[in-house]
Image (cartoon, grey):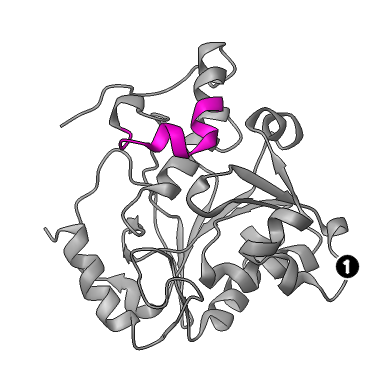
Amino acid sequence: MTDRNAARQNVWKELSKVARPDSRFHFDFSEFITDFEGSDQATRRLIEMEIYKNAQVIFITPDNCLELLRAQTIRDGKVLLMTSYGIRRGFIELLPGDVKPGMETWAIMLDVIERVGRFISLAEIQQRYPNIDLLVTGGSAVTHQGARFGKGHGFFDIEWATLYSMGVVNVITPIVDLVHDCQVVEEELEISIFDTVCDYIVTPTRVLHVESPQKPTGGIYWDRLEPGMMGSISILQELQQLEQVGKLRPDFVDREVKP
């Protein structure tokens, strides 16, 4: 079984041939999820899917490869939920009415969306959006079985666990991983109880459907968070407070951390 860090390194070598540099991090893939040649084709494949057409509320991660999708979401009159970089300032809500026609590509940029949209608390998400229809993320590597890995910080796993804990997504909520073809690996990668498995993998050339993906149902394992996360990720503090006062789902399947 291939180690996930080794898989990342192997993918990053190939990804560097088609990646688009970030203005801050250049080609340091350990710091951001890169855009790539063909992301427009992958985006077109995704927006043609029924799970996208039928969705009204979509959570999309702040990855570079998803900029076109975030802009299209607003053009199509859908609600966009996104987290700030590193989840440091929590969730952002962007409504179609917030953006002037023709300004969608500008409005969804990481340095702009926080000004055009608004920060939204977890309690507000529960009240306004009891059902999030679709989640879309990028990644570093993903297997044919839908096991995806990002930069190594576990941000998407925290985002999924948070939304699941709040009861606004469930195990049948579709998750899409939009990646370049070179990021789809043949190896079998080690899966932990935290890793969020995708329903669909969308690339510039194909759509892969994962049968019966096993998604985490344990919420946040507080004793397993990396040092400093509670202080740097604002939503974790609010989530813990909601859990303490009984505002989260009561049906966690397995709270035991297995070796």
Is residue 231 rendered magenta in the image? yes
Give the residue drawn at x 67%, y 34%: 121
Of residues 23 and 61, the one nearer the viewer is 23
Mark yes or no: residue 50 visible.
Answer: no
Quadrant that contains the N terminus: bottom left
Reading the image, the residue beneath label 1 is 100
In the rendered image of this protein, does residue 93 appear above or below residue 200? above
Q: Residues within 10 Å of mark 1 (few under 14, many from 20)?
A: few
Magenta residues, dominant SS class: helix
Quadrant that contains the C terminus: top left
Residue 74 placement: quadrant: bottom right
Point out residue 194 in the picture as x, y percentages from the top left corner: 33, 40
Give the residue drawn at x 36%, y 36%: 228
Give the residue drawn at x 81%, y 73%: 103
Is residue 171 rendered magenta in the image? no
Point out residue 32 in the picture as x, y percentages from the top left corner: 43, 65
Give the residue drawn at x 51%, y 46%: 87
In the rendered image of this protein, does residue 45 appear above or below residue 194? below
In the rendered image of this protein, does residue 240 appear above or below residue 168? above
Point out residue 79 in the picture as x, y percentages from the top left corner: 75, 52
Point out residue 151 in the picture as x, y percentages from the top left corner: 34, 59
Of residues 106 and 173, the one nearer the viewer is 106
Give the magenta range.
225-238
Disc 1 marks a residue whose amino acid type is Lys
